[in-house]
Amino acid sequence: MLLFSSKTTDNTIEMSRLLARAYLLSSILALVLIAAFFFWRLGSVITAEEERAARRFDALSEAVTQSWQRDSLEEASRETSQVLSARAPSRNPLVVSVYSFDEGVDYLWAQNGNLLEFMPNAQSSSPQIRMNDFVHRRFTRSFELPSGGRRIVTAVYPVLTRSTTYAVLRDILVAFLGLIAAMLLVALIHTVRQAHPARRTQRNPFVTPSPDTASAEHPLTPADEAPLDEAPSLGLVPRPGLEHRLSLELERAGFHEQDLSVAWFEFQDVADGSLAYHNAQAILAFFRFADLCFDGGQDRNAQSAVVLLPNASLPEALAQVERFQAFYWDERHAWARRDADFVCGLSARNGRMVDADRIIQECRAAVRKAQDLPGKILGFQPDPQRYRQYISGHSS
């Protein structure tokens, strides 16, 4: 049987908040790192392509220099075109030109005419090349002819192509998918851990919370601090501690703007201690938070138990009680008491600033009305607006 103190609940909530913040910050940091990796990877690709283009231009400019110094203009131009045609398009520059400022253009070669501002003539001093400084690099070298004249060879190379860009985007996509997978894995692990409270620390169900496990902000009453030999045989928290603990839970719920529901169980025809013990153990086995399960006392053949349900709205609490009803009906077969049953009345804070006595009265009223219902479960649904009007009318 599991037992959780109010401090454990608060610590769990606070830990969940810290984990959520850490999860968010880690995700943002990971996205920033992926963006930084993208720009670093892009820069490294451009740098590598620049170095490769520089080596290719050195070889091309050397071949052009030798041709222009050795052969006539027509022969040198033909040899240069043959060199460019023999290479793969990916290894060639986008534009190659040989010109002088005095005599104009000797040679011009381009993979695409759109790379030129206009088609120059022989008298043009230099070709006007369209280029993007981010994806293109321009290389220039001058050399001297045997006649004493000088020529300038210029070539424009791409440093960011579809293939290199694809490699960068592929790496970024892999990193991004890895981040999403890690985020989903963390969320799945957290969900599984939240769905299996049985993995938490187990303690004796018959021992009430000790002072070191009680909330330092809301100390327990002397009734809650009963030692082991004075603990009730049923395992439920004694009835005198109910109002005080309910007041603390209402205060905590109001501070955190959370809801709080209370379920009052009344078991019928409890004529012996054995059935009372089984009823109490069924409550503890299902609701698990033993320090929130109280002994409501016994009146004639009726046994009462009260369960506090923090951060649970009235519909959520009703759903829990309905599940407990099915659980209880299964358990009673093992007791050879198929006639054992209960009625339950519930109420909730529902956004109100309400005291413990008021909640208990609403639960008791719901219990009385539930006895006449087929399902034996009834929730008191308070209207916060009408309640405020009621309070205002009595205060005036």
Image (tube, rainbow, N blue to C red):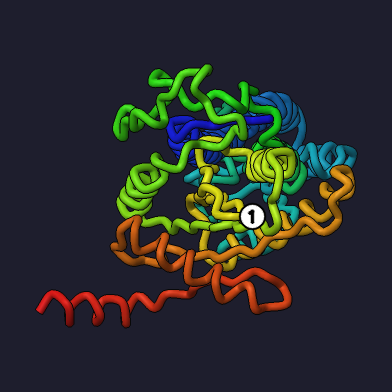
Read off the residue under disc 1.
Answer: 301
Q: Is residue 393 left or right of residue 277?
A: left
Residue drawn at point x = 17 percent, y = 78 percent: 394
Q: 349 or 137: nearer the eye?
A: 349
For the C terminus, the quadrant is bottom left
Give above or below for 212 relative to 42.
above
Count neighbours of disc 1 (C-alpha within 10 A) and say few if under 14, some if 14 to 19, many if 20 or more: few
Q: Position of residue 102 (x, y in %)?
A: 48, 45
Residue 335 horizontal/vertical position (percent): 85, 43
x, y percent for residue 257? 36, 56
- Mark yes or no: residue 190 visible: yes
Q: Nearer the viewer, residue 138 or 12?
A: 12
Query: Is residue 167 shown above or below 110?
Result: above
Choose top left, top right, bottom left or bottom right for residue 193: top right
Q: Is residue 164 left or right of residue 298?
A: right
Q: Amino acid at mark 1?
A: Asn
